[in-house]
Image (tube, grey):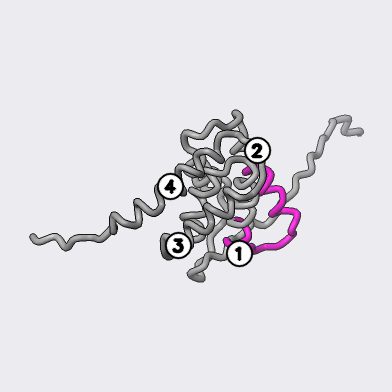
Amino acid sequence: MRCELRFTTYERVHSMPLMIAKRDGRREAFSSEKLERSLRTACAKRPLEVGAISKMVVNIENELHKLSKAEVEARVIGEMCIERLKILDRVAYIRFASVYRDFQDVDSFTKEVEALAETPDEDDGSKSQLRLIEDDVPRLARRGRRRRARHG
């Protein structure tokens, strides 16, 4: 007796989930959704090509998998974002860097904006917006963002 049934097999790559080592020592699984959300926040209301952020997320995720490591420091992912945003949109870069690099004072933020404004690039409108940010930094510093104690 012969079987005469047809069987098909499919190969799938089973990879271990990529773990992210956070600055505070915690570990969590890599989330492309979380990465995309943070990039979308930085790029909010910026004139970007449709799909540019999703493409960046896929590019970063592919690069992470090419590292062939089970765990990657969050700092590495942050720097990958910084590099790409600096090319994609300078205002989005400054937004992302201000959160990611956690500037301790207005001077360090000003230096970052000035360094970026001095970098030659085709004018996509973001350089003129960077000049506006540069103009606003001293004004914001004078405002003295102090928190007032609430009396209940």
Q: How packed is label 2: few (under 14 Cα within 10 Å), some, or many (20 or more)?
A: few
Q: Nearer the viewer, mark 4 or mark 2?
A: 4
Sequence-wise, the earlier of marks 1 and 4 is 1
Reading the image, the residue beneath label 3 is: 107
Seen in the image, is 51 located left or right of residue 146?
A: right
Q: How packed is label 3: few (under 14 Cα within 10 Å), some, or many (20 or more)?
A: few
Sequence-wise, the earlier of marks 3 and 4 is 3
Q: Residue at x 43, y 65 (%)?
A: 104
The image quadrant that residue 16 belongs to is: bottom right
The secondary structure type at the circle numbered 4 is helix
Dot 2 amino acid type: Lys
Disc 1 + disc 4, Cβ < 8 Å: no
Q: Nearer the viewer, mark 1 or mark 4?
A: 4
Calculate the distance from the C-alpha at mark 2 to the C-alpha at mark 1: 22 Å
- Above or below: residue 49 compared with residue 90: above
Identify the disc placed on residue 73. 1
Q: Position of residue 108 (x, y in %)?
A: 48, 62
The secondary structure type at the circle numbered 1 is strand
Identify the disc placed on residue 89. none
Identify the disc placed on residue 55. 2
- Which region is colored magenta? 55-77
43 and 74: which is toward the camera? 43
- Above or below: residue 115 compared with residue 73: above
The secondary structure type at the circle numbered 2 is helix
Q: Residue at x 81, y 39 (%)?
A: 9
Dot 3 amino acid type: Asp
Calculate the distance from the C-alpha at mark 4 to the C-alpha at mark 2: 33 Å
